[in-house]
Image (tube, rainbow, N blue to C red):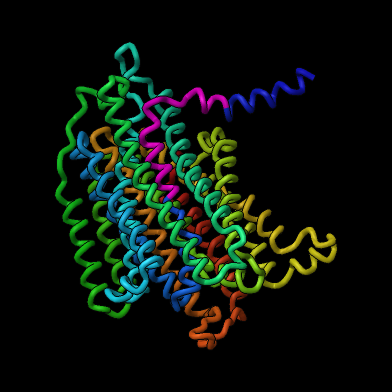
Amino acid sequence: MRTALSPVTRWIDAVVFDLGRQMRWSFLPPLMVYFAFGCATVATIVGTFFVKDFLDFSAAYLAGLAFWAGLPWALKMPLGHLVDLIWRWKSGLIYVGAGLVAISMGIMYLVLTQTAMMEAVAPIGTWYIISSMLAPCGLVLQDAVADAMSIEAVPVIGEDGSPIPESASKNMHTTMQTLGRFALIAGTVVVALVNIVMFSGIEALSEAEKSAIYARIYLIGLIIPVISVSGVILAALQRRLGHHSTERLPDAPRTQMNPWYFIGGGAFVALTLTIGLNDVPFGQEIIFIGSMIIVGLLMRQLIAVLPHTQARMLLGTALIIFFFRAVPRPGDGLTWFNIDVLGFDQQFLSVLSLLTSVMTLVGLVALRPVIAKWPIVRVIALLTIAAGILSLPNLGLYYGVHHWTAAVTGGIVDARFIALLDTAVESPLAQIAMIPMLAWIARSAPIELKATFFAVMASFTNLALSASSLSTRYLNEVFVVTREVREAGVVTMAADYSQLGWLLLSVIGVTVIVPLMVIWLVQRSPLRTTD
């Protein structure tokens, strides 16, 4: 019996207990900021139902709004460079970001509790858009600092005063980034639990009672900035007590300001405001292309400090991850179908959110030893194929496969069962893809440009999310999906899900074909990556 259990015991030790052994006191402050970042999803589900119940935004319009909300993340490059320049005072940006998140949550709380007052100033839809834009602005500030804090948390000097060996440093950086993703997803677990409790029995409540619950959720969201601020306060306390031995090496070169990062950031803001405020045709496309040009030029500035081979591999890796994240999503039409046709209510969607988070945590821990050893290309290729396969249950639910499965299983394998099973398997995919890249950046970038390197890769890959929003909008304009909209009890827009099947098929095809094609091209070019 002992022999049979030995491999299992060794696996548990390597996967679970070894992660605990590598946890350090200095890891806690950035983990608190990442945890607050995960908690910021508290308004995701309530926001979905708020739009559905109170606003007449179309799926294409919401995809466009997601595009705008994703653009602040492209500013991570100048923000990251700023963090490197103000390394000793970087925590101040956490306070600014926390303030923006608090304002975002506060706006929605007032919209729901003081509707007449807020509507006298601006339409409810405008307030929702403002709130939707403020939150990512605050989160990007906090994320840029959290990345820097995650670097600072890993010691560079051992207890004997000598630099820590590269192998040990690599292992600690991988652990730090895994724990960072773990903390972020743990925040979403807490949020899902809150939503499940708050949404219990909500389907039987009146609209006013539902609004009161939505308002309480936004009020709870005001705790989020308190958590992130507590993280930087803890870091300062650690330094004061002498427990923070992770400062840069005394002889490390000082960060030299490169004005092009700020010029590029200013150009990005100017372009966004000029196009956005003047309602220029194809404004989102112009901003996206302009942002790509700006980010590309700034990436060129950064990789110039790397050896030629390393720079090419970095660019190849970035391209692969970009196209993996740039694929379209079904959009809000699928959520509306799940709510209206399949009968998924607020509480069940919260359960799905909880399951997503929990299974992501399990996947991160269980697969950590594998993703630390596998090349990034292999990880992305397998995740691409898995994403395509795991999109099939949604397609099957649209075409009614749950009616057949429920009939042959006595009602056990119904629509909710299929949704739960699919969510459980699919959940860890996106987060797993990021860990090897983040660990590589943390250990490979010049010490005086760590935060800048993090920001460069984040800006480039987060532009992929804007590309995803654009392609999602295009597909939703080709395959139009509408939900029922009522005004004063009169139907002003009928529900129409007849084209959702073609939309889902198109998304599955692009999700699989595009990333695999990019991997094939990159690996047969001078940009080939082997890390």
- Which quadrant of the figure contains the N terminus? top right
- Between residues 152 and 388, which one lies in front from this camera angle? 152
| Magenta segment includes 36 | yes
The quadrant holding residue 273 is bottom left
The quadrant holding residue 387 is bottom right
Q: Is residue 89 above or below residue 21?
A: below
- Which quadrant of the figure contains the C terminus? top left
The answer to whether residue 97 is visible is yes
State the residue at coordinates (49%, 53%). Answer: 519
Query: Disc count in the image?
Result: 0
Q: What is the span of residues highlighted in magenta in the rendered image?
A: 17-39
In percent of width and height, residue 272 lies at 25, 67
| Residue ranking furthest to the top | 160
State the residue at coordinates (34%, 34%). Answer: 151
Q: Main secondary structure of the magenta part?
A: helix
| Magenta segment includes 124 | no
Q: Is residue 458 above or below residue 115?
A: above
Relative horizontal placement of residue 338, taking residue 485 as reference (left or right): right
State the residue at coordinates (28%, 40%). Answer: 451
- Between residues 297 and 36, which one lies in front from this camera angle? 36
In percent of width and height, residue 37 lies at 40, 47
State the residue at coordinates (51%, 69%). Answer: 332
In percent of width and height, residue 326 lies at 45, 60
The answer to whether residue 429 is visible is no
The quadrant holding residue 229 is top left
Relative horizontal placement of residue 283, taking residue 170 as reference (left or right): left
- Between residues 88 and 472, which one lies in front from this camera angle? 88
In percent of width and height, residue 346 lies at 57, 62
